[in-house]
Image (spheres, rainbow, N blue to C red):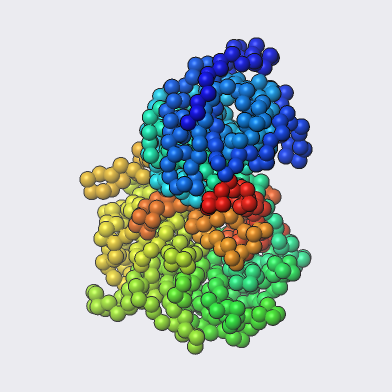
Amino acid sequence: MHRAPHHRSRSRRGAAAALLAASMAASLLGGTAATARPAPDPSSPRATTLSLPSPPGGANVRVLVFHASATEESPTVDAGIAAIEQIGLTGPAAGRFRTEATDDASVFTNAKKLGRYNAVVFLTGGGDVLDPEQEAGLEAYMEAGGGFVGVHDAARTEPYSDWFTGLVGARPTTSPATVQRAVVEVGDRQHPATKGLPLNWKRPDKWFNWAVNPSGSVHTVARLKESSYQPGQGANGWDHPVSWCRDYDGGRSFYTGMGGTADSYAETDFRDHLRGALAWTSRTSRADCKATITANYTAERVTQPNQPGQNDQIGEPHGLVTAPDGRILYIGRGGADSSQPVVTDWNNPDIGKGRGEIHVYDPKTKKVTLAGALTVFGNKGGGDELTKVEEGLLGIELDPDFMTNGWVYLHYTPHSRINRDTHMAERYVSRFTLDLATDKLDLASEKVLLKWPVQIHSCCHAGGGMAFDSKGNLYIATGDNNSSGFSGGYSGNNPQPNFKGVSFADARRTAGNTNNLNGKILRIHPEDDGTYTLPEGNLFTGEEPDEGGGKTRGEIYVMGVRNPARIFVDRTTDILYAGWVGPDAGSPSTTWGPAKYDTFAAITTAGNHGWPYCMGNKQPYRDRNLPDPNTPLGWYDCDAPKNESPNNDGLVNLPPITANTIWYSPQGGGPDYPRDAAGIPSYKVEEQKLLLPWLKGGGQATMNGPVYRYDAEKSDPAVRWPSYWDGKWFVGDFYDGDQPRHAVLTDPKTVGKGGVPVHAETLKKIIPVGTDGIRNLMDWKFAPDGSLYVLDYGRGFFTSDSRSALWRVTYKGGEPTPAAGQLARKAAAQ
């Protein structure tokens, strides 16, 4: 390592020198002062003072460590320089470099010297350390394609420069003096600076709060979990970036808020963090620092409003699926637009009659075809529980050999099968054939695979999603076919309300019943002749002798779900991802149990997910029964639940309940409470702990999304989402306020075992919210080209309107940087 002598008496910016003494406090607080040099306009090239090679540096990689400070030198400088020198001398040969250190800012006006460095590291202290000509030299260096790494206090350097603010990405509000141990969530699993780090990285440091959160304008690779330490005044909340990068003004910039203590530089993981940052900035490795920058995404509505009185573009949006050739098939449940009549009189044969429509959007022609329509029970408009209905055309999935056979699976409630006397109906899962040349559905080709009874006296909870796994097994999500009323918004376990002997307020008849297909996720294997077989590994075989036998259904893979409208199977892992809507209680009750929890679960094996006995991470409800359902009985045992409802025709002794992955209420995400000796939570709001602070409910309705899988060979580089998102699970909500619209990472060690996500990041700027955005998310899937299609339900209920639409979200950020031809060494690999 070559370390130049210290030079403390450099020429200073005339006006800045006078301002510095009076403004040092503002500098330490990260306040943005006026500057004569605003952030650069990328479209307007600016004159520079230096002529530098482009890109700077060569195969003999050199890194300059600049450590000037307007006040006394930080005690971390020597440790930082020593660590960077050691990083450069160790590791794979392709990533090694020579380190030179100086506090002499004249290097930034010496083209010969500056041009030989692949990257510049700022281990600077706070304040103004560059005069105008020197900062112009740094700008010229970045414009030429140079690399910059800022460490900790570098964010307090050059406080009067908007350009430097853009270079580092954000300014701190304070200069913390206290060292605290905190958890760093490492969300980017591909960048060389983070790919080898723990998902939850626990370490001590001095932690900055940011005056303006840079998320969306930079690519954040790691965040702080504020619940793990005391962030103090100006906390940034759940989205608290700590390390980030961006392609800036022609070059590459990486900043980390860590490194505020000398001890940091002795940590192996922190050195690896710096090693990866230097690999990217010095051009020995490529990385994508564009993947979460909002401006790199475009959301476009691809369907138009329907013609008056027609559903030529879209029905009442209820689900979509993407075909291997890029076509998008999407369904309308059956609610008519406001110009159409609604029949609610049970004496009328046309009660609830609607059209469950299937549309096809072809991205090659950008045209929509109405493929066909089923006559469904599903059009009763809005109103109370005994008026409205959620039945209709509920789900769509394509056969794994769709491009050969054209088979389409539809989950629906045929109007022809309703009984107006008993208020019962049948639910079908049927196979139809689509003409691949005309995009028309042959309704006469129907093969009914599976059917079962549902009550239709009362709304709601029909479910509907379907998905295939890699083995050709079809998963079918069914709701609990239960009213939301009669239980105060807590467990749907009131056995009393019924119509002609069929309960409509007791989910123990359905979701909690081992002998009923409602409130389940079923798993079958469709056969070519239109029948199905049962795969091994379902929750039951259907032949269990327990309690006299005949009390189980072999189709059940998951029981104890309330209203799973959307499911997804990641065919890379065959993990099932599901979300279901919870009940209506706005707050927890010390008498009855948890508030309404909307739920997501990553499911790796057959199991019981709780409803209506337990929710969240095995938080029990109170039992009730006849003769007085308003009298609370004992708490359910989540490890050994019993179904003692008079409406149960299945097993009394149920499988133990599996904890879920994500749950949220109006109080926040992942509410948890202290538990007594029997394991019963206190259910006192003032005692709750929020395990998932990045989300919150209110009005809430889960809309489970896909797991993204990046495919470099089959996708379209002009539109595909980048590989950064590979393996991330998209979770959302019908509503667009505090509710989730996020991509999350799960820990492979705890996924499917009740482990909560280790990282989450918002998608609300990428998949835009608000009146003119995708306000009411109904379904979302990635197409083979790597773009994301999203259904916006519209602004009404049980109908479609001018805002009902299919959208497409594409990425335009380009490939990782630097370009392969600009790598410093041929042996360097991404």
Q: Position of residue 640 (x, y in %)?
A: 25, 60
Please name whichever residue, 583 or 168, is drawn nearer the observer in this view of the structure: 168
Report whether residue 50 is seen: yes
Side of 264 relative to 33 (left or right): left
Q: Position of residue 511 (x, y in %)?
A: 39, 66
Please name whichever residue, 227 or 345, is drawn nearer the observer in this view of the structure: 227
Q: Residue furthest bottom?
A: 529
Image height check: is 113 above or below 810? above
Q: Which of the 4 quarters of the picture holds residue 687?
A: top left
Q: Which of the 4 quarters of the picture holds residue 310?
A: bottom right
Q: Residue, x 51% and y 83% (percent of image)?
A: 448
Please name whichever residue, 616 or 795, is drawn nearer the observer in this view of the structure: 616
Q: Position of residue 92 (x, y in %)?
A: 45, 47
Side of 703 relative to 690 (left or right): right
Please name whichever residue, 730 or 22, is drawn nearer the observer in this view of the structure: 22
Q: Which of the 4 quarters of the picture holds residue 520?
A: bottom left
Q: Position of residue 546 (x, y in %)?
A: 24, 74
Image height check: is 482 above or below 418? above
Q: Residue, x 39% and y 53% (percent of image)?
A: 747
